[in-house]
Image (cartoon, rainbow, N blue to C red):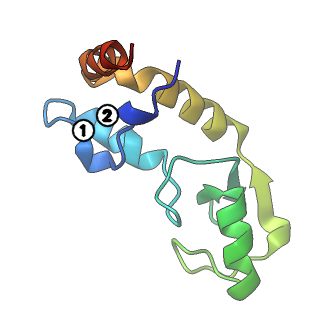
Amino acid sequence: MDMDFVDIEDPTDWPEALPHLHQLDAHLRCPICKEYFTTAMMLTSCGHNFCSLCIRRYLTTEKKCPSCRKSVDDSELLPNRLIDSITRSFRSNRWAMDGTQEIYKTKTAKKR
């Protein structure tokens, strides 16, 4: 099932009636690219998480955490499989939580 068109592009796109989902959505996004985490990596010295590619690219130019500015090194990167799992679950279920299932049904019917 292709649900690209029901993606909530920004955490602020959540309806006001769902403020907790807005916060959860924001926590599951990389602070560098602002997209949902892709292969989340944690900096062990400060605990901040980023997409693997984002943080690796960032650390080639600056050896500081982009969030807290603490000095870090590539060797401090650790895969965060829990964040990856939570992000996958959230993304696969959020269309049912935000009311876009009606949009999905409408757009699917138009494609037929």
Does 57 appear above or below 29? below
At label 2, counting other C-alpha atoms closer than 10 Å, the crowd grade (few under 14, some 14-19, many 20 or more) is some
Q: Quadrant of the C terminus?
A: top left
In the image as oriented, which residue stretches furthest toward the bottom? Answer: 61
Residue lying at 49% horizontally and 44% vertically, measured from the top left: 28
Q: Which mark is residue 14?
A: 1
Q: Which mark is residue 81?
A: none
At label 1, counting other C-alpha atoms closer than 10 Å, the crowd grade (few under 14, some 14-19, many 20 or more) is some
Q: Amino acid at mark 1?
A: Trp
Q: In what element is the residue under mark 1?
A: loop
Does 66 appear above or below 15? below
Identify the residue position indicated by label 2 in the image: 21
Q: Amino acid at mark 2?
A: Leu
Residue lying at 79% horizontally and 66% vertically, measured from the top left: 76
Residue 99: percent from the left, percent from the top? Answer: 24, 21
Residue 52: percent from the left, percent from the top? Answer: 71, 57
Circle 1/circle 2 CB separation < 8 Å:
yes
| Labels 1 and 2: the sequence-earlier one | 1
Residue 11: percent from the left, percent from the top? Answer: 32, 47
Label total for image? 2
In the image as oriented, which residue stretches furthest toward the front? Answer: 112
